[in-house]
Amino acid sequence: MSENYRSMWSDLGLDLDAHDILMNLVGNAYQATFLSQENRPDGMSYFDFVMSEVHGLRIKELLDEKEAGRKIIGSYCVFVPEEIVLAANATLVGLCSGADFATEEVEKLLPRNTCALIKSAFGFKIGKVCPYLEAADMVVGENTCDGKKKAYESFGRLVDNLYVMDLPQMKSGEGRALLKAEYHRFKKELEGLTGVLITTESLKNGIRTVNAKRAALHRLSSLRKHAPSPISGLDSLLANQVAFYDNPARFTESVNKICDELEKRVSDGTGVFPEKRPRLLISGCPQAIPNWKLPAIIESSGAVIVGEESCVGERGVRNLTDDSGDTVDAMMEAIVDRYFQVDCAIFTPNSERLDHIQEMVAAYRADGVIHYGLQFCQPYLMESIPVERALKEKNIPCLSIETDYSMEDVGQLQTRIEAFVEQISG
């Protein structure tokens, strides 16, 4: 990134030396993980550019928006409705939580056996290395798991603009009523922050913008159903990750452009890998930038990832929002309906997730499933047991992986995954 951004980072309060270390680590990991791939679609050059400027040009764009009076809303979860944010003349961006940073300092505030994603969010703040977090006018936390719920009590002492959204834990009438109340409370808070009253027209436009983005990602996912796969799992994951940061209209255009290219590959019978490979589905915890460890190991072990049953994947974009309402209240109901279908592991019971995994295995013609759980992430680790049991009853091979953001277990994971790939290849 250009040295011209250093004054911008300094003005945001970043620790420039620590930020240099982070950017070097991410840059080297990106080079080794993505740019070393062969036969990549030409359209991936856009996403390479986005990553090269993820803390540079994109941050400048956000600061320019702020200068023009637009508010920036940062979030950690797909339950934060982008449709409402856009309708209030604000921009939603994902916040950094995909790598270890300032771990020793974090563990002075949180127990050591806290999941890596939560500790990462704290580390990026304490280490002063996330420009998205420092640029945000509001940081939205959400009470998904117990770990996050309690962690936000401490996080609120680190940031002065934290807004915490409560989420239901059961798929019931009462649960939906809670989500509806929270979304209306969020809408009112945004209107107060931005000074913009959400109207029927602005909310409809917000819904259509987000629907277009999700539809483009649906199109990308559908193309991965073909054999041979026209794109690697790593590159498709990257597109899903960039969706949380990029300008939505520009992102949608870029995804549709690469889909045009992939459709030609499918028509020509061209795959991203030269030989037939086992097709795997990853299921479980979200994978935020730069958490690329597990998919890199999988695809270097002779398999291709054809789908992600994840918040950074199909779970996050599965359903579109009905935009046919002619009042704000009607469209708010549609937004609640859409998000209440998300089958996060926080819900109990959560049979819909088991059904969706099996549906994805069939639709993507997967030969097996790798269930990914972040260490100390109780909801997904607990669900890994019934998931594995249900898949084995259907004779679908499944391997449960529990790991964190460190690289210490790469050798062990490589051995286990290579054995799994060999097993399903036979």
Image: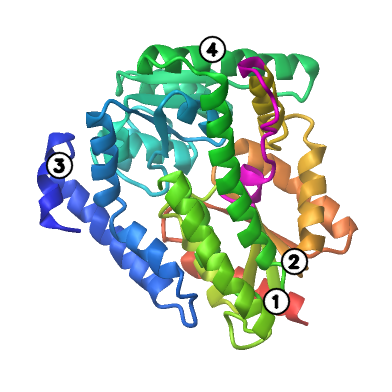
How far across and how far down the image is residue 311, in percent?
59, 44
Asked if the residue under mark 1 is in contact with the one under mark 2, i.e. CB atoms within 8 Å, the reply is yes
Residue drawn 50% across the image and 28% down it: 148
Residue depicted at x 61% and y 22%: 167
Q: In this orientation, which residue lies closer to the viewer: 58 or 79? A: 58
Disc 2 packing (10 Å; few <14; some 14–19; many ≥20): many
> What span is colored magenta in the figure?
308-329
In the displayed structure, 392 sits above or below 127; it is: below
Left or right of 244? Residue 181 is: right
The residue that mark 3 highlights is 8
Q: Which mark, by number, is residue 185?
A: 4
Name which residue type carries label 2.
Answer: Gly
Marks 2 and 4 sit apart, C-alpha to C-alpha, by 42 Å
Q: Look at label 3 and name its amino acid.
A: Met
Which corner quadrant holds the N terminus?
bottom left
Residue 203 visible (yes or no): yes
- Residue sitting at 40 percent across and 55 percent down? 290
Q: Residue at x 70, y 33 (%)?
A: 322
- Report x, y in % for residue 360: 76, 57
Q: Which residue is mark 2?
A: 368
Please name whichever residue, 295 or 329, is drawn nearer the observer in this view of the structure.
329
Magenta segment, prevailing SS (helix, strand or loop):
loop
**Disc 3 to disc 2, C-alpha distance:** 46 Å
**SS at mark 1 in the image:** loop
**Tag 1 near tag 3, CB within 8 Å:** no
